[in-house]
Image (spheres, rainbow, N blue to C red):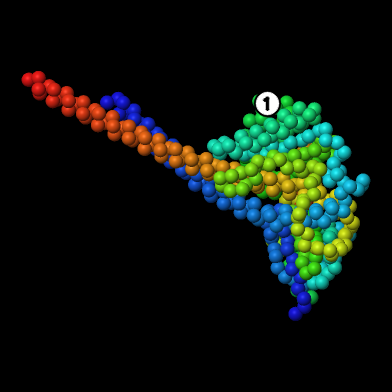
């Protein structure tokens, strides 16, 4: 068995995940990077994207985060994310419907503030949808 | 006798009040447990954020190009005060003590010739501050709609504060809230959140390890600071909700106890009156019989 790296995934509301994995690929701000046990200490910001967890050669889990930070120290990886969702929990049809709704909201918006909020919502949903592919 | 009837009515009314306060105490205890759980669950994120801040910010302090959120605007003329209170009353001195701390600080700042703005979170605080500082209150954030404080409640407040800071509307921002110590004690605290105070003594488990930064320190810090602000506000709101429930719990416990004492006293009085009535009736009968 290869060395394992401990990953803590925390959101402001709770500790979402704390477990050992073989390899974790993070969506770094300047490109994806993989973290194995013994990775050199690094602090990086993350762009909205998918964290992939590998076991052996197989991708075991995919978690969407909407940006955040990752810190690697010794044998520990800490990911701070304001939002994290398992990609497997996402539902494509549902998301597409919500994007459609958001788009309509945006068109119907009466003032700038509502329009901006609808656009933000749509971008957010679009990111989620992109993560599924 | 009319007096006896009155006493009886009072006893039963105090009894029903006691039932209500007892129920409120129980509800507050259950809510307190939830609030404490939420506060505990939020701790890991805040702690790691702190340690990340500490390791990043220590290198930046004193540098000219440090971000404004960390270094400040170089002036402390204009203050923004966030008064975080509860949405409901009947919780002892909770709302009042926060409002009092806020007004103390505001008075001090005004006396020193500073400009002050107040942002109220929770309408009880606004009600208390409105009379004295109505012209200083810029807005009220109403959280009565959300049953349990979530990060989504803190985020809009943080965004609002950041937007105001970017628009150069204030220099220093302080948030007032009650820190939860125990059910009996809550400490009102004024915490400065802009410019960010570098967490002291936060554990950096990195030791002497040199970190790589990606993209680079400044950019990470620039992203970290706004997020840190929302975490600070979130933490304050969580502490506050735990404190509010704690204060309500002990206030209601006191009320229940007082009601119990009242009932005892009234019952004693009722019995005495009853006995007196019987005695006087007896005397009437006896003296009537003797007169014959």
Report the residue at 74% width, 31% height from top: B108
Q: Quadrant of the N terminus of chain A?
A: bottom right
Residue at the extreme left of the image, as rendered: B292
Residue at the extreme right of the image, as rendered: B64
- Give above or below for B281 relative to A113: above
- Quarter-of-image position of residue B72: top right
Judging from the image, mark 1 belongs to the subunit labelled B
- Give above or below for B269 relative to A103: above
Label 1's element? helix
Left or right placement of residue B261 versus residue B93 in this view: left
- Quarter-of-image position of residue A51: bottom right
Q: Quadrant of the C terminus of chain A?
A: bottom right
Left or right placement of residue A96 versus residue B15 in this view: right
Report the residue at 84% width, 64% height from top: B209
- Give above or below for A26 relative to B107: below
Q: Determine if residue B59 is in view.
A: yes
- Give above or below for B59 relative to B18: below
Q: Is disc 1 surrounded by few (<14), some (14 to 19) or many (20+) residues within 10 Å?
A: few
Left or right placement of residue B6 versus residue A46 in this view: left
Give x and y (percent) for residue B33: 57, 51
Foreground of the two, B225 or A120: B225
Give x and y (percent) for residue B75: 86, 36
Report the residue at 65% width, 37% height from top: B98
Residue that carries the numbered disc 1 in the rendered image: B132
Left or right placement of residue B145 versus residue B200 in this view: left
- Quarter-of-image position of residue B40: bottom right
Report the residue at 13% width, 22% height from top: B287
Foreground of the two, A4 or B152: A4
Give x and y (percent) for residue B143: 65, 40
């Amino acid at each position: 068995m290869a060395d394992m790296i401990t990953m803590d995934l925390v959101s402001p509301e709770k500790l979402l995940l704390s477990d050992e994995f073989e390899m974790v690929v993070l969506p770094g701000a300047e490109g994806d990077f993989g973290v194995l046990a013994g990775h050199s200490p690094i602090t990086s910001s993350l762009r909205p994207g998918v964290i992939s967890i590998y076991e052996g050669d197989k991708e075991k889990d995919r978690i969407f985060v909407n940006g955040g930070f990752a810190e690697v120290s010794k044998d520990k990886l800490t990911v701070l994310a304001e939002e994290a969702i398992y990609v497997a929990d996402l539902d494509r049809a549902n998301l597409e419907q919500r994007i459609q709704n958001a788009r309509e909201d945006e068109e119907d918006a009466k003032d700038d503030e509502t329009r901006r909020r609808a656009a933000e919502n749509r971008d957010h949903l679009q990111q989620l949808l992109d993560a599924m592919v | 006798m009319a007096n006896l009837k009155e006493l009886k009515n009072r006893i039963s009314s105090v009894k029903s009040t006691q039932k209500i306060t007892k129920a409120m105490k129980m509800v507050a205890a259950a809510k307190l447990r939830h609030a404490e759980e939420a506060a505990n669950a939020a701790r890991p994120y805040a702690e790691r954020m702190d340690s990340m801040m500490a390791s990043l910010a220590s290198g930046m302090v004193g540098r000219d190009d440090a971000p404004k959120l960390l270094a400040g605007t170089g002036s402390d003329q204009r203050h923004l005060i966030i008064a975080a209170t509860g949405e409901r009353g009947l919780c002892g001195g909770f709302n009042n003590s926060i409002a009092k701390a806020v007004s103390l600080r505001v008075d001090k700042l005004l006396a020193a010739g500073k400009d002050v703005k107040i942002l109220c979170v929770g309408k009880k605080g606004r009600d208390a501050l409105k009379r004295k500082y109505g012209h200083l209150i810029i807005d009220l954030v109403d959280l009565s709609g959300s049953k349990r404080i979530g990060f989504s409640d803190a985020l809009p407040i943080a965004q609002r504060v950041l937007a105001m800071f970017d628009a150069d509307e204030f220099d220093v921002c302080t948030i007032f809230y009650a820190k939860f110590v125990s059910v009996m004690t809550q400490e009102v605290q004024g915490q400065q959140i802009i410019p960010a105070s570098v967490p002291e003594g936060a554990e950096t488990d990195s030791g002497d390890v040199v970190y790589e930064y990606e993209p680079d320190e400044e950019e990470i810090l620039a992203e970290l600071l706004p997020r840190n602000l929302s975490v600070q506000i979130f933490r304050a709101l969580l502490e506050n909700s735990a404190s509010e429930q704690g204060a309500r719990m002990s206030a209601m416990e006191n009320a229940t106890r007082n009601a119990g004492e009242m009932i005892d006293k009234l019952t004693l009085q009722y019995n005495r009156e009853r006995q007196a009535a019987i005695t006087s009736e007896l005397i009437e009968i006896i003296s009537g019989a003797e007169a014959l």
